[in-house]
Image (tube, grey):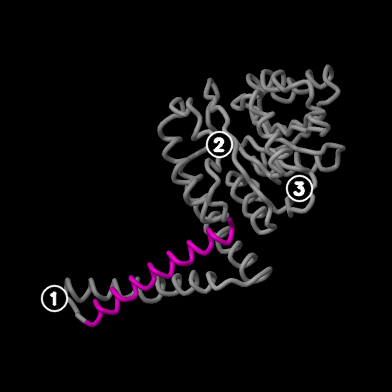
Amino acid sequence: MYKDHRIAVVVPAYNEEKLIGPTLAGLPDWVDRIFVVDDGSADGTRAVVEGRAREDPRLTLIVHERNQGLGRSLVDGYLASSASDADITAVMAGDNQMDPADLPALLDALIERKLDYVKGNRLLHPDIGFMPPYRFVGNAILTILTKFATGYYSVMDPQCGYTAIWNATLKRLPIRSMTSGYGYNADLLCMLNIGRFRVGDVEVRPVYGPEQSKIILRRYIPRTSWLLIRLFFRRLWQRYVVRDFHPLVLFFWVSVFNILFIIIPFTIMFLYIYFREGQAERTTLIILVFTIMTTVQLLLFAIWMDMDYNR
């Protein structure tokens, strides 16, 4: 136990036969339950975990016969932990990228700061310079987009999978509907925001060693971008229409209408006339400029109100 609370750790693993052993060996003795989810590994991951399970009674192996995605692995791990006697569930990847020395800081944030969910933040750690440049840039862009999608504007590094959550909070979330692939972080944050749960960051050390990222960028970027757009509108509908009402939702919808049905069509019309006749259509230009200015103001007001409402 940790400060009178039973702790479970979910360890998703996919083809991690070389690193799953050190990952499990590094878990503190005070961890009460360990749920390893083997997501259809084609290597010896399952055998390594089974070997450790014979020596460690805390360990439970959950096996996917075929690869179902990281999100699905976490759902199954969360469900298993929720059904156990654990009070808190932490997530540590099976590739040994997460320093066990940081786990107490995440748990303290839940227990002492009265948060419902806490996640690691690698971007403020002095060792962030060791993060590959392409990951840092991609992480920064996704951080900004995720802020808008989830409403947690003060949260950084949403791609960090080092997290902890109260099991009582887990049981109040529609966790079974969480996306099965990458992007689960934003999906879970969106669920938490709709439920008005308190979320915070804790500085953790970025660890980069022999592991190789399994993310395929040409698939990851469009899928995650589309997911964030859907989460944004889901949150607006649930928070500001279904569960409550706030005029900011009208500001956002008017802005979207202006962009789709006025700004884009009038821009195409203006450019067509300009390049065909060699001169600008003044009326079209006035309507276009006025609508752009109005839309920008509406968006800024909506974002400001969204940030204030979620504070």
**Label 1: which residue?**
279
Quadrant, the N terminus: top right
Q: Nearer the viewer, residue 30 or 188?
A: 30
User: Whole-percent x and y of residue 221?
Assistant: 47, 47
Q: Residues within 10 Å of mark 3 (few under 14, many from 20)?
A: many
Say the numbered circle drawn on residue 121: 2
Give the magenta part as a residue range.
283-311
Q: Compare marks 2 and 3 and give the one earlier in the sequence.
A: 2
Q: Compare marks 3 and 1 and give the one earlier in the sequence.
A: 3
Magenta span: chief secondary structure: helix
Above-or-below relation of 222 to 247: above
Q: Residues within 10 Å of mark 1 (few under 14, many from 20)?
A: few
- Secondary structure, mark 1, is loop
User: Whole-percent x and y of residue 277?
Assistant: 14, 77
Which residue is depicted at the point 47% across and 49% down? 144
Task: Quote the CA–CA distance across marks 1 and 2.
Answer: 53 Å
* Kind of residue indicated by mark 2: Asn
Side of 264 where 311 appears, left or right: right
Image quadrant assignment for residue 17: top right
